[in-house]
Image (cartoon, rainbow, N blue to C red):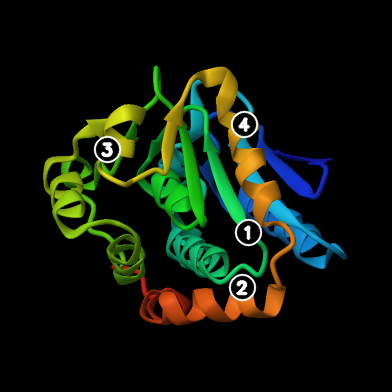
């Protein structure tokens, strides 16, 4: 479900699970891929992207959570919160190449990266929980508050609106919106430029910036 390639100093993690929804199998493979990146020697950076033009990630696997995984759903969501915390303090630069839809937990996954590049012509960023009737875990709210402007987050959460790449760039949700063919190359360029940063200092600075969000995410408390 996760293909790992390398271009220069940049590891490219391509998510190849359709809508790239989070379930135990997907999270396990993603965790192993992050382990490989973190264990690499020398200058290193990371880019994540979707394997199709339609989806970056659509977040939690609600079908699994309400079906075969119902008894394990809360534990899986707790694992997702810990994944976000790991990204917030990841010791190498990370860039999300958002080549398709980034909904709900998938949008939060992108937000946990250091930088985001989104295509401007197709694909939406959306936090639809208000329309799904689903509250956010405290850690999810803390992550979003740490990364997004207050007025932007208010409108995203209370309206469930879908924003395209140009609107996301205008509101600071992503760092830039580019043509589809440029999303991955531009993300790699951004990551490569930062790949030589000192890992200890990089992690320490991120831990300082996002201390509150990391602490709440690490608690992994999930609404029952």
Secondary element under disc 2, as helix, strand or loop, is helix
Q: Which mark is residue 170?
A: 3
- Please indicate, yes or no, whether residue 224 appears anywhere in the rendered image: no
CA distance separating discs 1 and 2: 8 Å
Mark 1 or mark 2, which has the lower sequence index? Answer: 1
Q: Are marks 4 and 3 in contact (CB under 8 Å)?
A: no
SS for callout 4 = helix
SS type, badge 1: loop
Instruction: Measure how far apart labels 4 and 2 are at the Cα level.
Output: 23 Å
Q: Upstream in the sequence, badge 4 or badge 1?
A: 1
Residue at x-position 60% and y-position 37%: 49
Q: Which mark is residue 22?
A: none
Query: Which residue is disc 2 drawn over?
Result: 202
Residue 93 numbered tag: 1
Identity of the residue drawn at 47% across and 58% down: 112
Look at the image and tell me in which quarter the C terminus lies.
bottom left
Q: Give the residue at x 47% y 27%.
A: 100
Front residue (pair 67, 153): 153
Tags 1 and 2 in contact by the CB under 8 Å rule? yes
* C-alpha distance separating marks 3 and 2: 27 Å
Q: Residues within 10 Å of mark 4 (few under 14, many from 20)?
A: many
Q: Is residue 154 left or right of residue 123?
A: left
Q: Residue furthest right?
A: 41
Comparing marks 4 and 3, which lies closer to the viewer?
3
Q: CA distance from mark 4 to mark 1?
A: 15 Å
Mark with earlier residue (4, 2): 4
Q: CA distance from mark 3 to mark 1?
A: 23 Å
- Give the image location of residue 93, x and y in percent: 63, 59
């Amino acid at each position: 479900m996760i293909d790992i390639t390398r271009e220069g100093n940049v590891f490219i993690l391509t998510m190849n699970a359709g809508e790239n929804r989070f379930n135990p199998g997907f999270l396990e493979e993603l965790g192993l891929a992050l382990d490989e990146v973190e264990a690499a020697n020398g200058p290193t950076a990371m880019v994540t992207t979707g394997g199709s033009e339609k989806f970056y990630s659509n977040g939690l696997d609600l079908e699994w959570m309400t079906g075969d995984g119902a008894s394990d759903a809360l534990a899986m969501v707790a694992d997702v919160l810990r994944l976000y915390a790991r990204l917030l303090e990841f010791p190498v630069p990370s860039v999300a190449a958002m080549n398709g839809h980034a909904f709900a937990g998938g949008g939060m996954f992108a937000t946990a990266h250091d930088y985001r590049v989104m295509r401007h012509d197709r694909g939406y960023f959306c936090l639809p929980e208000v329309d799904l009737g689903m509250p956010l875990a405290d850690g999810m709210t803390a992550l979003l508050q740490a990364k997004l402007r207050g007025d932007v987050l208010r409108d995203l959460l209370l309206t469930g609106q879908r924003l395209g790449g140009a609107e996301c760039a205008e509101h600071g949700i992503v760092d830039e919106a580019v043509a589809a063919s440029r999303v991955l190359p531009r993300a790699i360029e951004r990551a490569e430029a930062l790949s030589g940063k000192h890992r200890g200092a990089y992690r320490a600075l991120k831990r300082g910036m996002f201390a509150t969000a990391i602490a709440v995410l690490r608690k992994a408390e999930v609404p029952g």
